[in-house]
Image (cartoon, rainbow, N blue to C red):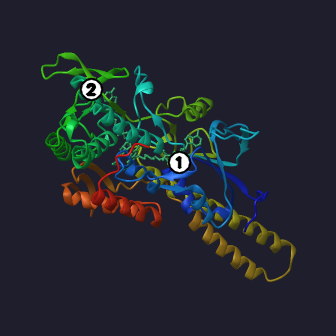
Amino acid sequence: EDQVEPDPSKKTLVILGTGWGSVSLLKRLDTENYNVVVISPRNYFLFTPLLPSCTTGTIEHRSIMEPIRTILRSKRARVKFYEAEASSIDPDRKVVRIFDNSEIRGDITETEVPYDMLVVGVGAENATFGIPGVRENSCFLKEIGDAQRIRKRIMDCVETAAFKDQSPEEVDRLMHMVVVGGGPTGVEFAGELQDFFQEDIKKLVPDIADRFKVTLIEALPNVLPMFSKQLIEYTEKSFKEEKIDIRTKTVVKRVTDKAVEAEAVAADGTKETVVFPYGLLVWATGNAVRPVVRDLMARIPAQANSRRGLAVNEYLVVQGTHDIWAVGDCAVAGYAPTAQVAGQEGTFLARLFNNMAKTEMLEDKMAQLSASLNVEPGNPAAVSREIEEHDRQLRRIKDVKPFHYSHQGSLAYIGSDKAVADVTWFNGNVAAAGSLTYLFWRSAYISMCFSTRNRLLVINDWLKSKVFGRDLSRE
Ligand code: FAD
Ligand code: NAD
């Protein structure tokens, strides 16, 4: 049980990433069947749906992190974990090149890990479309570090705006929070920001309070394109009441350290350039392919026409390979890049791998039995019966159906204790919005949290910020 060295009789299964896809796979994988190796620069799982709440301190960041070491400890057989980034994958030699990208490094910082089977679950990086100034000047909202940076920066803007003799224009700029991208990340963040302001900043820093402003910029004609029309309207109406300025049909073209330059299409179809001076800029325009994935795609001829990630078949096998699988945001399987999809894909792979191991075991057993039938006299009828039984089991196991995604619905928090939900219920679609939906949102996310520990911490954070207000100290 406590074996540390890889068992030569078992295949080596290497899993890249500790996000939604990889961790869902690990959760259900029978680790006794393989030598399992997990590689990720992040030694924890992150519950991303509550990340926007960390930017204002409604939830403390550690409440939505679960250490991978804790997750792996509960597995039946020992799993190796290396905190490292995969820099390249060689499908011919079947090795992954990894390097230690953390602050503290030992003598060895780079090496290779061989695999028999590989699962790529490295997620995606932030899209910037090469727009000048974005990387240098904006905050993203994907990782814990991003949320912490935003939280610090909001308070820095507020305290700098309150600085003695600050000019009114400068106060307006510093108190202007600009969000680019009207997908769920941008919308949820804008909602959280407005809550923070209404519930806390306004009371604690009253002198500059009326200058606080949130602007949400979106290139398309409306926000939340994946939601139904009535929920889009509800969100836009609700934002208007909360005084969040939504600028649709506005495409950001350039960013400097103090202003965002965009091209807006007016009602009559004319284009104009609009400049938004800002104190905080959060960039949430969706996903781009990670370099390690792009590199792998370039090595596989069958991936030549794929743009948004690794094209996979209905068993999540990377097209053009037979021993590499991909899950989540780095895989193109025909679904949206969401936690829901990544989670179901991971669960599917666990079932597939557990099955494959069982199949192999039964096939070996059958070969042994057949051989014994030929050499030993024994009881041929009993052996044949056993073979038949194994054969029946084998047929049952081999019948793994292709991956099928079951959509449970879309859910987003929009601020002021309101949420929007498009849910499938008894085969019908239900669109709901408002405060009751918010309670539903809360309970759904609580039940989805990784562990009981996470659940208790999140509930505690919610209560704490309700009773005492959010903590305005800037770490
Ligand atoms: P991730 O969860 O991003 O995990 C990728 C993993 O790979 C990480 O552990 C990372 O450290 C690791 N990694 C990165 N590079 C390498 C490398 N080179 N080598 C090895 N490992 C690497 N979806 C929903 O369905 N509902 C929601 O409410 C929701 N809310 C969201 C809120 C926010 C703020 C964000 C950003 C996303 C949200 N999503 C939501 C989307 C969801 O988080 C993603 O679709 C999901 O995380 C994808 O899972 P994944 O496993 O592919 O990638
Ligand atoms: P997204 O891709 O959903 O939205 C990005 C938005 O940015 C798009 O509407 C796009 O038109 C806009 N945009 C792009 N370039 C622009 C520019 N130059 N100027 C102005 N606007 C521009 O991205 P996201 O919100 O980060 O979400 C990523 C994924 O994660 C999605 O699949 C989403 O469903 C999922 N997610 C889900 C939830 C939830 O269910 N509550 C929350 C967050 C994220």
Image quadrant of residue 238? top left
Q: Is residue 241 left or right of residue 306?
A: left
Identify the residue shown where x is 20% and y is 21%.
Answer: 265
Front one among 361 and 247: 247
Ligand 2: give its quadrant. Answer: top left
Task: Name the spot of residue 128 as percent of width and height, x first.
Answer: 42, 27
10 Å crowding of disc 2: few (<14), some (14-19), many (20+): few
Q: Amino acid at mark 2?
A: Gln
Front one among 334 and 245: 245
Q: Is residue 131 left or right of residue 270?
A: right
Image quadrant of residue 318? top right
For the N terminus, the quadrant is bottom right
Marker disc for residue 316:
1
Chain-order first, disc 1 or disc 2: 2
Identify the residue shown where x is 37% and y is 63%.
Answer: 460
Task: Name the spot of residue 468 as percent of width and height, x first.
Answer: 30, 58
For the C terminus, the quadrant is top left
Front one among 245 and 362: 245
Is residue 265 in view from this perspective? yes
Task: Name the spot of residue 275 as percent of width and height, x first.
Answer: 26, 20
* Structural distance between the alpha carbons of marks 1 and 2: 57 Å
Task: Name the spot of residue 122 as percent of width and height, x first.
Answer: 54, 43
Q: Are marks 1 and 2 in contact (CB under 8 Å)?
A: no
Q: Amino acid at mark 1?
A: Leu
Is residue 403 in view from this perspective? no
Image quadrant of residue 88? top right
| Residue 257 in the image: above or below residue 200 | above
Q: Is residue 225 left or right of residue 229?
A: right
* Residue marked by disc 2: 166
